Image (cartoon, rainbow, N blue to C red):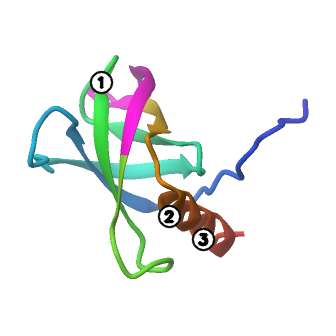
Amino acid sequence: MLEKRKHKRVVRPLNIRFSFNESYPPNWNLSSYIDNISAGGVRFTAPCDLTDKVLKLEIQSPRWIPRTLVLDAVVLESKPSEYPSFFNIRAKFVNISDEQVKDLTILENDFR
């Protein structure tokens, strides 16, 4: 079945740190790696269940832009992974600016 996507998925090992959006300043004590990412959202593994959470995400890649990208996201799905005590998270970016979309597009193009 052909998948129709607005944004290309990037499947590379990228670091991600996340914080619950209600904490300000963000408490970046949770980190993981990204399974895949596009301008629409991200899939990553987390050491806790994030069902119904709103997150602040910090994404870093040494290859694409010389700064850290910080985005807001809402968790669409949080389900147990094949590894004990870990969860597969699928989240959608929300309230992203045109500049952030541009940065995500640079990220997508860099990994083609």
Q: Position of residue 101 (x, y in %)?
A: 55, 57
Tell me the residue that label 1 is attached to: 53
**Which quarter shows the C terminus?**
bottom right
Distance from the alpha carbon under mark 3 to that under mark 1: 27 Å
**Residue type beneath disc 3:** Ile
Marked residue nearer the N-terminal end (3 or 1): 1
Q: Position of residue 17 (x, y in %)?
A: 27, 52
Q: Quadrant of residue 66?
A: bottom left
Q: Which residues are magenta?
A: 72-87
Task: Give the mark nearest the N terminus, 1 or 2.
Answer: 1
Q: Nearer the viewer, mark 3 or mark 2?
A: 2
Q: Secondary structure at mark 1?
A: loop
Which residue was labeled with disc 2? 99
Foreground: disc 1 or disc 2 = 2
- In this view of the protein, can residue 18 be seen by the observer? yes
Quarter of the image where the N terminus is located:
top right
Q: Measuring 34% from the left and 76% from the top, which residue is drawn there?
A: 67
Q: Please tell me which residue is depicted at 41% across the width and 79% down the height of the picture.
A: 62
Name the amino acid type tagged 1.
Answer: Lys
